[in-house]
């Protein structure tokens, strides 16, 4: 990756695509290679460094470039302009930072003339943004640099670029963890234990694998359902998936020994099935009866249930807005199930039933998502894991307490 643009067999290629497993060295080698190529090839030109957001781009790429390029060049950052100026061997070029987080991001890059562009985690960016950035590369000798971890095989980038790399005159390199000399065999094994199912295929094996079948195929009633339960008390939580015509679910959580969390009981009311929708006040009354005198540390509710959240706060409940990122939440729940850190009371009948029917949506849109049917207990479960066990420690960069 560092010198492909010098190799006689590849130097006339219009760009490079690198995909593969996590922690395989793609980001470091691509960022350094991009800077070496651009600084040796051009002078007084402009380039684009693109990430999902500018914050993630700084964290993963531009903020580390001075360390990676130490002794080779001088890098001056102008944060207010989202720009780096780099000087090396008598050449000076400018590198602009862009975040491609949604379909409207393409407007940010319109009107520029670029000599090259680097996309870090291109599969996380909308197609409109990527294609607008590519259209800006009109300087003679400009090249495209793409890296990413795999998504599903119907993803637009896989279909339009990776499978057509040769046709588009691009070099394609596939990375695995073994390509990263900084990872010991023990660390590689740790990552292999970290993921399950489709996430193992993508993040460890580096495959553009389809999400299909049961989402939590690691759930086993004989392991994850137990009658050996702690008492509900200090430090418990309630997670709620709130519905109007759709079901409303409460799950009560209590920490046990060895970092395990137990779902002690569930509440389930479907206005559609019961032919009667309850009011916010009735649900709040039901929550009080559900808790039976137990004072939760917090109640976690989907932020979209604004009126219900307001009522709970009026009644004195400490409420947290749930982290509702679906795919990352599913992965976290799957990891904890595999490690046997989430256990359930036999009385959580609806929750156990949903584990057997919670499947990936195979509608071939290219977007991974669960089928939105019989998923309300699963949503409440995901809210608890993502909000209580993960988000509270995310900014400190620590392993969440209780995991």
Image (spheres, grey):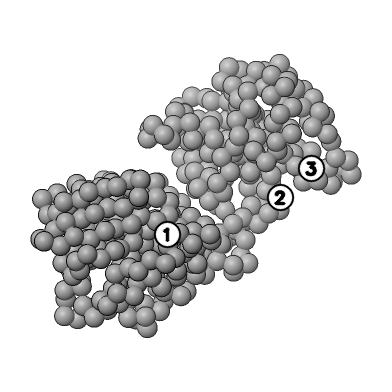
Q: Earlier in the sequence, mark 2 or mark 1?
A: 1
Query: Which mark is drawn over residue 374?
Result: 2
Asked if residue 346 is positioned above or below residue 139 in the image, the reply reads above
Indicate the position of residue 360 as horizontal and vertical percent values. 60, 58
Q: Which of label 3 and label 1 is nearer to you? A: 3
Where is residue 400 drawn, in percent x and y?
44, 32
User: What distance separates the C-alpha of mark 2 from that of mark 1?
Assistant: 27 Å
* Lateral position of residue 342 relative to residue 200, left or right: right
Residue at the extreme right of the image, as rendered = 275
Using residue 169 as the reference point, say whether residue 225 is left or right of it.
right
Q: Position of residue 222 (x, y in %)?
A: 58, 41
- The residue that appears at 63% across and 27% down in the rendered structure is 319
What residue is rendered at 48% in x and 36% in y?
Answer: 390
Q: In the rendered view of the protein, which quadrant contains the N terminus? A: bottom left
Q: Nearer the viewer, mark 2 or mark 3?
A: 3
Circle 1 Cα neighbour tier, 10 Å, few/some/many (<14 / 14–19 / ≥20): many
Q: Between disc 3 and disc 1, whose residue precedes?
A: 1
Residue marked by disc 3: 244
Q: Quadrant of the C terminus?
A: top left
| Residue 201 visible in rendering | no
SS category of the residue bearing label 3: loop
Secondary structure beneath dot 1 equals helix
Q: Position of residue 377 (x, y in %)?
A: 67, 42
Which residue sits at x=45%, y=59%? Answer: 108
Q: Find disc 1 in the rendering and name its residue.
A: 202
């Amino acid at each position: 990756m560092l010198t492909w643009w010098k190799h006689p067999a590849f130097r006339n290629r219009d760009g490079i695509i690198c995909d593969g497993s996590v922690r395989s060295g793609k980001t470091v080698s691509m960022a350094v290679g991009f800077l070496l190529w651009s600084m040796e090839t051009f002078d007084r030109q402009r380039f684009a460094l693109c990430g999902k957001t500018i914050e993630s781009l700084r964290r993963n790429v531009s903020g580390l470039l001075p360390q990676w390029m130490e002794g080779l060049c001088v890098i001056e950052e102008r944060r207010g302009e989202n720009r780096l100026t780099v000087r090396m061997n008598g050449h000076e070029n400018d590198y602009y930072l862009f975040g491609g987080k949604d379909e409207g991001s393409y407007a940010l890059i319109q009107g520029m003339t670029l000599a090259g562009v680097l996309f870090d985690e291109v599969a996380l960016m909308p197609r409109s943004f990527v294609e607008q950035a590519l259209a800006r590369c009109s300087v003679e000798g400009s090249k495209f640099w793409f890296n990413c971890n795999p998504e599903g095989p119907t993803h637009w980038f896989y279909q339009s670029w990776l499978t057509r790399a040769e046709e588009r005159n691009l070099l394609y390199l596939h990375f695995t963890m073994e390509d990263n000399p900084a990872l010991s065999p023990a660390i590689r094994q740790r990552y292999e234990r970290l993921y399950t199912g489709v996430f193992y295929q993508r993040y460890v094996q580096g495959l553009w694998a389809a999400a299909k079948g049961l989402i939590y195929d690691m759930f086993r009633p004989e392991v994850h359902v137990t009658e050996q339960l702690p008492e509900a008390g200090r430090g418990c939580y309630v997670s709620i998936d709130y519905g109007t015509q759709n079901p409303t679910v409460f799950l009560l959580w209590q920490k046990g020994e060895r970092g395990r969390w137990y779902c002690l009981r569930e509440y389930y009311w479907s206005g559609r099935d019961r032919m009667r929708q309850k009011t916010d006040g009735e649900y709040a009354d039901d929550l009080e009866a559900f808790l039976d005198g137990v004072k939760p540390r917090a109640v976690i509710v989907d932020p979209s249930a604004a009126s219900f959240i307001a009522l709970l706060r009026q009644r004195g409940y400490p409420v947290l807005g749930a982290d509702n990122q679906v795919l990352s939440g599913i992965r976290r729940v799957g990891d904890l199930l595999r490690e046997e850190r989430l256990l359930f009371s036999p009385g959580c009948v609806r929750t156990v039933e949903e584990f057997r029917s919670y499947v990936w949506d195979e509608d071939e849109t290219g977007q991974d998502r669960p089928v939105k049917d019989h998923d309300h207990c699963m949503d409440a479960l995901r809210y608890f894991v993502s909000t209580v066990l993960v988000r509270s420690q995310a900014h400190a960069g620590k392993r969440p307490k209780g995991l």
